[in-house]
Image: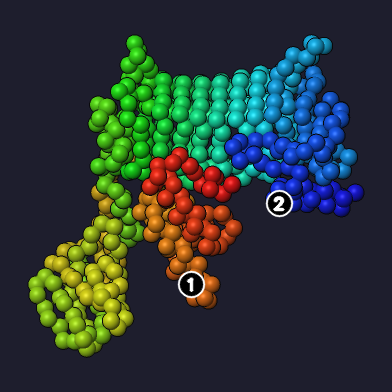
C-alpha cells in the first residue's frame, strides 16, 4: 500500500513539473487547477473532493467539529491541494458553519494552499503549515481574529497580499528565511503584533504591509531590502524606530509622508520616532525631506572589528616584509621596493578594522600594501601599541574601534544577500559576471575563487552549486528590476 502511495506522489509531482493535467497559473500562484474535466467530484467525510488520476484536491469542507484533520491520502491518492475558500466561514443552509474550527492538522503531502482558504475562521487559534507547501494564496488567513500562532513552511518564498490581514490576536510570527517579498496588506491590522524579523533575502515590502500594526515598536529592514512601498508602516501608533540597513533602499515620494507614521490627523501624517540608517543614505534623505528624526549608524560599509588581544605595557609594533625585489629606495614615511630579494623592517601604523600580522610574504610580480598581502609596502610613522614586552616576536593588535551612534542593530553585511556576489550591497551586471566566472572555472576543474557566502549569494535557484542559469537570473534581475524599474523579486524569476 505504501508503495502505491509513493508512486502516486511521484506521478503527481511529474504532472506538476511537466505541465500535465494540472499546473500553477502564471498570474496567481495559488491552488492547482485542472486543464480539462479529468476528475470526479465526490463527498468524503465532510469534504468535497476532486479526484484526479494521481492526486486529490480538497474543494470544500462542511462540518461543525472544533478539531479538523485533513488526511494525507484518500483512496491511496495523495492530497496535494486545498482549493480557494475551502474552509471559508460560510453559513450553510442547515445552519452549520466552519467558524467553529479551533485547530487543524494539514496533510504532509500538501503542496499548494489557495486563496482565502481559512478566511473568516474566527475561532481558529493555531495552525502549522507543513514544509512540503511551496505556495499560499492571497488572504489565506485574513479575518482569523483568534489566530495567535502560525508555523509557516520553510519553502515559502513570498508572503502574499492580505495573508494575515486583521488577525488581531497574532503577537509574533516567524518569516521563513527563503521569503523574498512581503505582499501588500500582508499584516495590515495585526494590532497585537509586537515584533517581526524580515529575513536577509527579503527585497520588498508591499503597500500597507504593516499598516495599523499598533503594537509594533521597532522594525529592522535588512540589507537585502531595496524597496518600501507606500503606507507600509502607516498608523503604527507605538512604532519608535525604523532601522534601514540598505543605504540605497527606496521610499516613495509623496506630499504627505505616510509611509512611516504613528497617526494621521486631518489628512496629515505624523511620526514621532526615528529613522535609523547610514550617513548619506536614502534613509537619511527620506528623514530630512520629511523633517523626521534621523539616527546615524555611521558610514557605510561599517568597519570590521579586529580580534581582541591581551595587552600589557606598550611596545612599538613593527612589521617584517619579505619580497623578491631590487634594492630599496626609502622615503620617510614610505618605503618602495622593487627587483631583488630584500628584507625591510618598517614601523606600521595600526588602524581600526585592520589586523596587523607578523610577516607578509609577497609572491614575484605582485604588489604589497600595508594591511594586504601585496608587493609594495607603504609604511607610516610608528605608533605605540599594546603588546607583550617580554615577547621578541611582532604582535598582532588593533585599538578598539569607534562606536557608532546607534548600536541597536547588528552588522547587516556579515552575509551576502541574494545575487550580490561581490558584497557591495546591490545586484549588478558585475555580480552576474562573477557567477559565470565561478561556473566556468569549476567546470574546468579549477579551484573556486569565491567564498562560501559568495557562492550562497550566487546560487539563486538554491541547488547547491553555481550554474549558468544562476548567472542569467542575476543579470535578468538587474536588467528588469534595477534598469527597467519593474517590481519583481527572485520568486518571480524562478517561476
Q: Position of residue 247 (x, y in %)?
A: 32, 43
- Is any part of residue 291 visible from this angle? yes
Eyeballing the image, is 3 above or below 382? above
Looking at the rendered structure, the secondary structure element under dot 2 is helix
Query: What residue do we see at 87% from left, 50% from top?
Result: 4
- Is any part of residue 193 visible from this angle? no
Looking at the rendered structure, the secondary structure element under dot 1 is helix
| Disc on res. 66 | none
How far apart, in angstroms, are the residues tagged by discs 2 and 1?
A: 32 Å
Earlier residue among tags 2 and 1: 2
When asked about the image quadrant of residue 323, the answer is: bottom left
Q: Outermost residue, left direction? A: 332
Residue 495 placement, left or right of 64? left
| Disc on res. 441 | 1
Q: Nearer the viewer, residue 457 or 42?
A: 42
When asked about the image quadrant of residue 254, the answer is: top left
Eyeballing the image, is 308 above or below 265? below
Residue 369 placement, left or right of 205? left
Tags 2 and 1 in contact by the CB under 8 Å rule?
Answer: no
Q: Nearer the viewer, mark 2 or mark 1?
A: 2
Query: What residue do we see at 40% from left, 42% from top?
Result: 485
How packed is label 2: few (under 14 Cα within 10 Å), some, or many (20 or more)?
few
Q: Position of residue 218 (x, y in %)?
A: 41, 31
Query: What residue do we see at 51% from left, 27% from top?
Result: 185
Q: Position of residue 302 (x, y in %)?
A: 31, 50
Q: Nearer the viewer, residue 486 or 142?
A: 486
Residue 404 placement, left or right of 423? left
Query: What residue do we see at 42% from left, 63% from top?
Result: 434
Residue highlighted by disc 2: 18
Amino acid at each position: 500500500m505504501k508503495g502505491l502511495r509513493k508512486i502516486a506522489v511521484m506521478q503527481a509531482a511529474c504532472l506538476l513539473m511537466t505541465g500535465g493535467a494540472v499546473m500553477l497559473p502564471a498570474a496567481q500562484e495559488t491552488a492547482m487547477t485542472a486543464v480539462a474535466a479529468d476528475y470526479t467530484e465526490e463527498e468524503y467525510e465532510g469534504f468535497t473532493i476532486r479526484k484526479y488520476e494521481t492526486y486529490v484536491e480538497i474543494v470544500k469542507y462542511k462540518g461543525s467539529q472544533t478539531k479538523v484533520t485533513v488526511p494525507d491520502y484518500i483512496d491511496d491518492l495523495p492530497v496535494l491541494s486545498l482549493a480557494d475558500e475551502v474552509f471559508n466561514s460560510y453559513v450553510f443552509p442547515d445552519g452549520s458553519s466552519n467558524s467553529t474550527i479551533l485547530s487543524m492538522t494539514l496533510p504532509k503531502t500538501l503542496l499548494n494552499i489557495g486563496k482565502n482558504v481559512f478566511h473568516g475562521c474566527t475561532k481558529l487559534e493555531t495552525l502549522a503549515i507543513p514544509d512540503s507547501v511551496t505556495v499560499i494564496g492571497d488572504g489565506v488567513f485574513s479575518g482569523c481574529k483568534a489566530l495567535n500562532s502560525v508555523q509557516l513552511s520553510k519553502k515559502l518564498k513570498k508572503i502574499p497580499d492580505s495573508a494575515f490581514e486583521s488577525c488581531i490576536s497574532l503577537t509574533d510570527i516567524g518569516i521563513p528565511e527563503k521569503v523574498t517579498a512581503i505582499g501588500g496588506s500582508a499584516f495590515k491590522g495585526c494590532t497585537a503584533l509586537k515584533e517581526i524579523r524580515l529575513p536577509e533575502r527579503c527585497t520588498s515590502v508591499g503597500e500597507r504591509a504593516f499598516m495599523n500594526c499598533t503594537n509594533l515598536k521597532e522594525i529592522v529592514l535588512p540589507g537585502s531590502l531595496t524597496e518600501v512601498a507606500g503606507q507600509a508602516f502607516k498608523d503604527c501608533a507605538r512604532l519608535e524606530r525604523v532601522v534601514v540597513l540598505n543605504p540605497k533602499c527606496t521610499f516613495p515620494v509623496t506630499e504627505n509622508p505616510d509611509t512611516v507614521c504613528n497617526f494621521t490627523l486631518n489628512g496629515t501624517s505624523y511620526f514621532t520616532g526615528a529613522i535609523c540608517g547610514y550617513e548619506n543614505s536614502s534613509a537619511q534623505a527620506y528623514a530630512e525631506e520629511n523633517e523626521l528624526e534621523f539616527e546615524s549608524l555611521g558610514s557605510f560599509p561599517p568597519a570590521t572589528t579586529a580580534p581582541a588581544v591581551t595587552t600589557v605595557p606598550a611596545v612599538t609594533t613593527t612589521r617584517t616584509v619579505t619580497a623578491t625585489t631590487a634594492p630599496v629606495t626609502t622615503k620617510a614615511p614610505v618605503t618602495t621596493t622593487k627587483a631583488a630579494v630584500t628584507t625591510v623592517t618598517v614601523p606600521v601604523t595600526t588602524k581600526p578594522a585592520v589586523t596587523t600580522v607578523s610577516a607578509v610574504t609577497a609572491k614575484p610580480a605582485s604588489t604589497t600594501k600595508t594591511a594586504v598581502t601585496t608587493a609594495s609596502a607603504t609604511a607610516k610613522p610608528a605608533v605605540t601599541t599594546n603588546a607583550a614586552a617580554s615577547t621578541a616576536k611582532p604582535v598582532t593588535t588593533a585599538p578598539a574601534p569607534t562606536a557608532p551612534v546607534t548600536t541597536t542593530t547588528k552588522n547587516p553585511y556579515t552575509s551576502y544577500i541574494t545575487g550580490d556576489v561581490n558584497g557591495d550591497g546591490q545586484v549588478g551586471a558585475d555580480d552576474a559576471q562573477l557567477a559565470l566566472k565561478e561556473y566556468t572555472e569549476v567546470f574546468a576543474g579549477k579551484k573556486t575563487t569565491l567564498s562560501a557566502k559568495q557562492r550562497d549569494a550566487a546560487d539563486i535557484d538554491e541547488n547547491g552549486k553555481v550554474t549558468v542559469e544562476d548567472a542569467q537570473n542575476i543579470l535578468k534581475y538587474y536588467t528588469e528590476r534595477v534598469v527597467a524599474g519593474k517590481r519583481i523579486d527572485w520568486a518571480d524569476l524562478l517561476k
